[in-house]
């Protein structure tokens, strides 16, 4: 009780490499971006957003911790809260945590997730400081935010997974560091 069940795809009664099949698709159905720039008096506002939809990722972050080589203190909270705990509670998203269970370490569609997202990648507000009465000084000030927010149902750190971008393992998420959120401010003065 509490183990994943693997399907015998070729019907020979044994789970072997012959039962493996392709699962998921790392290629998005579409990706698009939109940018806009608005000026109002001395203010200038620009924004860039992007959207990717239909790609799937193999979320490996909970997978290695489902065997007994890790103690319970090292499990992500969502795995501990949503696991099968005993035969008395036979339901849960994740299997029981035990090295003796079936399929420890096997890839499974249980960890394939939708990687669709909407992200505000850049937002910048500027102010043009026109020359004063002397007419000699000119300047501009700006505030900028990069990766301000992301809307996604993906449980990994970043739906734009980049762990293996140049190999046949694209879409495998081993907990790659997410894109940073960066805030900057600046002033330019010309005399």
Image (cartoon, helix red, strand yellow):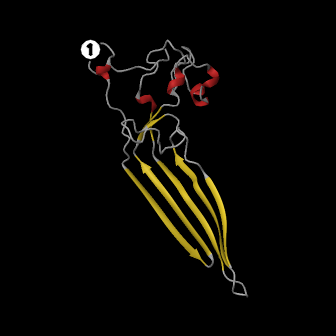
The one of 16 and 93 positioned closer to us in this rendering = 16
Res 23 → quadrant: top left
Residue drawn at x 54%, y 20% is 84
- In the image, residue 108 sits, relative to residue 162, either above or below, namely above
The one of 99 and 186 positioned closer to us in this rendering = 186
| In the image: residue 115, left or right of residue 181 | left
Residue drawn at x 45%, y 58% is 33
Q: To which residue does mark 1 refer?
A: 12
- Count of numbered marks: 1
Q: How far from the left and from the top, in percent, is residue 176?
A: 52, 38
Residue drawn at x 43%, y 38% is 164
The residue at the far right in this view is 133
Res 169 → quadrant: top left
- Dot 1: within a 10 Å radius of its alpha carbon, few (fewer than 14), some, or many (20 or more) residues? few
**Rendered-image quadrant of the C terminus:** bottom right
Q: How far from the left and from the top, in percent, is residue 186?
A: 66, 65
Kind of element beneath mark 1: loop
- In the image, residue 100 sits, relative to residue 92, either above or below, namely above
Residue drawn at x 73%, y 87% is 134
The one of 191 and 80 positioned closer to us in this rendering = 191
Q: How far from the left and from the top, in percent, is residue 182?
A: 61, 53
Q: How far from the left and from the top, in percent, is residue 107?
A: 41, 26
- In the image, residue 132 sits, relative to residue 167, either above or below, namely below
């Amino acid at each position: 009780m509490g183990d994943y069940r693997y399907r015998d795809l070729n019907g020979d009664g044994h789970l072997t490499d012959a039962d493996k099949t392709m699962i998921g698709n790392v290629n998005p159905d579409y990706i698009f971006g939109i940018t806009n720039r608005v000026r109002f008096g001395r203010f200038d506002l620009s924004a860039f957003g992007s959207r990717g939809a239909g790609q799937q990722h193999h979320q490996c972050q909970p997978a290695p911790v489902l065997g007994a080589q890790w103690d319970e203190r090292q499990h992500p909270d969502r795995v501990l809260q949503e696991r099968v705990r005993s035969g008395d509670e036979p339901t849960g998203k994740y299997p029981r945590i035990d090295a003796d269970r079936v399929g420890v370490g096997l890839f499974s569609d249980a960890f394939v997730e939708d990687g669709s997202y909407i992200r505000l990648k850049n937002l910048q507000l500027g102010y043009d400081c026109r020359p004063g009465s002397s007419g000699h000084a000119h300047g501009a000030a700006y505030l900028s935010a990069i990766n301000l927010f992301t809307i996604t149902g993906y449980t990994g750190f970043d739906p734009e997974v980049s762990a293996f971008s140049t190999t046949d393992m694209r879409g495998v998420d081993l907990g790659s560091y997410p894109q940073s959120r960066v805030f900057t401010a600046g002033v330019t003065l010309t005399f």
